[in-house]
Amino acid sequence: MYKSNDIIFKYIEEESKRQVEGIELIASENYVSEDVLKAMGSILTNKYSEGYADKRYYGGNKYIDEIEKECISRVKEVFKAEHVNVQPYSGSPANLAVHLAFLNPGDKTMGMDLSAGGHLTHGFKVSISGKYFDSVSYGVNEDGYIDYENVRKIALEHRPKLIWSGFSAYSRVIDWNEFRKIADEVGAILVADISHVAGLVAVGEYPSPVGIADVVTTTTHKTLRGPRGAIIMCKEEYGEVIDKAVFPGLQGGPHNHTTAAIAVAMNEVLSDEFKEYAKQIKKNAKVFSEELIKMGYKVISGGTDNHLFLVDTVGSVGKSGKEVSDILESVNITVNKNSIPNDQRKPWDPSGIRIGTPAITTRGMTEKDMIYIASIIDNALKDSSEKNIDSLRESVKQFTKKFPIPGLGI
Ligand SMILES: *Cc1c(COP(=O)(O)O)cnc(C)c1O
């Protein structure tokens, strides 16, 4: 039955309103610029271009080739990478392409445990990376830090062909060189997945694994503040296997509108403003975590060196991560429930939450605003009566009016 699309556009309006009136603390989210949105919403989505620039399986790719080449050259400039592939549809397919490039089904791979802060695609058992490959994992210590001696021990015992470093929920700095040594000791390919910290890495606010790891993958939509997509960077010698794994190994035609939007985002990353932005993300995360600690909350590893931190909500307020995230959602604050290291509870109802500052920093919030948000969180968790929740939600709505988000009305 043919229908009007009004309902879809109405929901987009409602979602815009939700984004405007809420405080977004999900560490993997951000607000892209109008230029990024413009490129993403362009007619480039109409075009098929299987293959790579100057080697396409379809005609009519004159301009698409230029866009992809320009995008690759900007990524190389930002990350000082040797070889770059900008075609992966998103972070998960990028990581699957890396598995495909270096492993046969059943081969050994090793990554950080999901409950310790790793990602599904680093060998978690229900993911294809843990089903089609023989995956082993390493975790963190009681204090929340990676214990490299333990990583080495597991690597020596299992001798994986691929070692994954990188995370979705780890608030500290990774010692890429230490991973390099471990990979060399067992003859493994080292992959660094910088999806979360790519924006910080791009401007020197987090150490770069480029030139240390054999392969570096990243999403483009988190701290990098681009469209949903991904990039694989590698040493020249692995360029061919990586490209072949992405296409024709795993994907068909690239999403050219996304490629164009990644190019636009890379240009923004090269601006002075982005450098300031990345610094402010870290300052905000630090002040935010310190404020919660002052109020008696248990922050995993005692703080943060990047854009995120984890709170043990069971240990802090006797509520599970899910309960806390539900209460906060009712006052227009969005966080995600998250396992904490050595969590005794299940992933769908874990013991903590993850808090990140990339999105609210894009909106222009600074240290004093972190202190304010921490106080709202504490208030909502200590008194979740309907009256208090209603009044806090009103305060949040008023507060967010001061911080516009880009791209409304496009
Ligand atoms: C977000 C993330 C991914 C996956 O990205 P999607 O675009 O959601 O598929 C992969 N690895 C890490 C470390 C991530 O944080």
Image: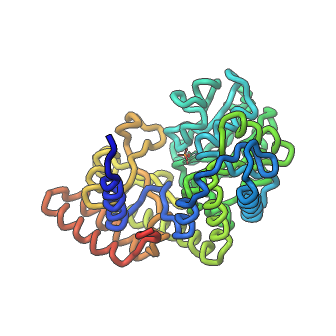
408 is higher (above) or lower (below) than 299: below
Q: Where is residue 116 in the image (x, y as percent from the top left)?
A: 52, 41
- Residue closer to the observer: 72 or 395: 72
| Residue 320 visible | yes
Q: In which quarter of the image is residue 348?
A: top left
Residue at the location (49% across, 70% down)? 362
- Residue closer to the observer: 77 or 322: 77
**Residue sticking out furthest to the right:** 237
How many numbered badges does the structure rendering display? 0
Colour mode? rainbow
Residue at the location (64% across, 24% down)? 134
Q: Which quadrant holds the C terminus? A: bottom left
Answer left or right for 344 relative to 126: left
**Residue sticking out furthest to the left:** 387
Residue at the location (66% across, 33% down)? 110
Q: Where is residue 191 in the image (x, y as percent from the top left)?
A: 71, 43
